[in-house]
Image (cartoon, helix red, strand yellow):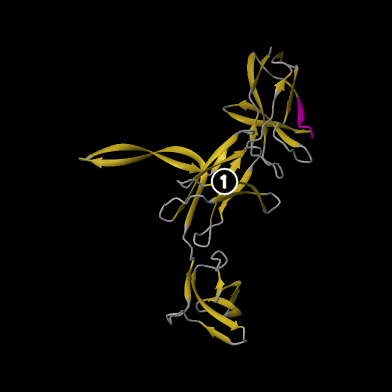
Amino acid sequence: DVFGGEIEMRAAGTTTWHGLATDRQGSLLIAYVDDERFRNGTYEFRARAVDQAGNEASTGRRIDGSAATLRLPARIDTRLAVGVPRTIVRRTIERRHGRRRVVRRRIRRLDSNVVARRGRAIRLKGFLANADGQPIEGATIEALEQRPEGGVVPVGLATTGTDGKFHYVVKASRNRDMLFRYRGSRRIGSATTDFLLLVPAHTTIRPDRTRLRNGQQVLFTGRVTTRPLPAAGKLVEMQAHFRGRWRTFSTVHAARGGRWRFPYRFGGTLGRVTYRFRARLPAEGGYPFINGNSRVVKVVVVGA
């Protein structure tokens, strides 16, 4: 019987051999190849075995005398998709009997880049299949999240049904860069796909008065509700709608508690004018939200 030994492999045409972990199963010396560890291509193998008496033998051939080679990847290729179901309409132009007509087709797809309000629960759908589209049943799908400081951490699991489909719920608590991974098995290859959830920043806004005369002052106050805030506080841009677009006319910082205040005195208003204001929260380093705005508030100013 085999007492011990080793199995090695190298890429065809190279000189570097890589040792593989081996196990004894009766008279056999067994090793498994991780096809994620090595690049795709053809590999040569050789084995050395020792019996109880110390006799040693080595070979680079199969039982039938052919060279011991293997082409990677050796496992069945898999495809993994995760996202929010969307229906898009695709328009194509067809010609029939010399006439052109527009054909609209509805196409279902999984959107893996989603923007959602803070606090929403996003129900994801996923599908795992082999390269021919056959579903893989009973597979465990890992959900991992990439941290801003680097590295990934596991956050949950899902299991595919008989149709290869699975569901996973993600909470929109902040921007989330996620990975979904199927580790595969000895016969089925692994698969990984990503999902990006973006959450807009949000703040409340309230004027202390909505009607005033030219020369008087209005005090805007608010509270940033999307946290955590940067250590130095959150930048808030005050904007007014002027000549068809929103323009930033001043800035203020929200304190650590998220509250901010901004006084503004009107001058130069003629007649009766309705002004529209909002607060904008720009994206910042260390703040896990994308650009966001408050609701729009109106202030009526009566001039001379």
- The stretch drawn in magenta includes residue 259: yes
Quadrant in the rendering for residue 5: bottom right
Determine the residue positioned at 62% across, 26% down.
241
Quadrant in the rendering for residue 90: top left
Label 1: which residue?
158
Q: Crowding at label 1, few (<14), some or many (≥20) Cα neighbours within 10 Å?
A: some
Determine the residue positioned at 55% across, 86% down.
57
**Relative to residue 207, is residue 84 depicted above or below?**
below
Q: Is residue 116 visible?
A: no
Quarter of the image with the N terminus in it:
bottom right
In the image, 37 versus 285, the foreground residue is 37
Magenta-highlighted residues: 256-262
Percent position (x, y) of residue 227? 72, 36
As helix, strand or loop, the secondary structure at mark 1 comes to strand
Hey, what amino acid is under mark 1? Ala
Determine the residue positioned at 79% across, 35% down.
256
Percent position (x, y) of residue 296? 63, 24
Quadrant in the rendering for residue 247: top right
Percent position (x, y) of residue 230? 75, 40
Left or right: where does residue 44 sit relative to residue 276? left
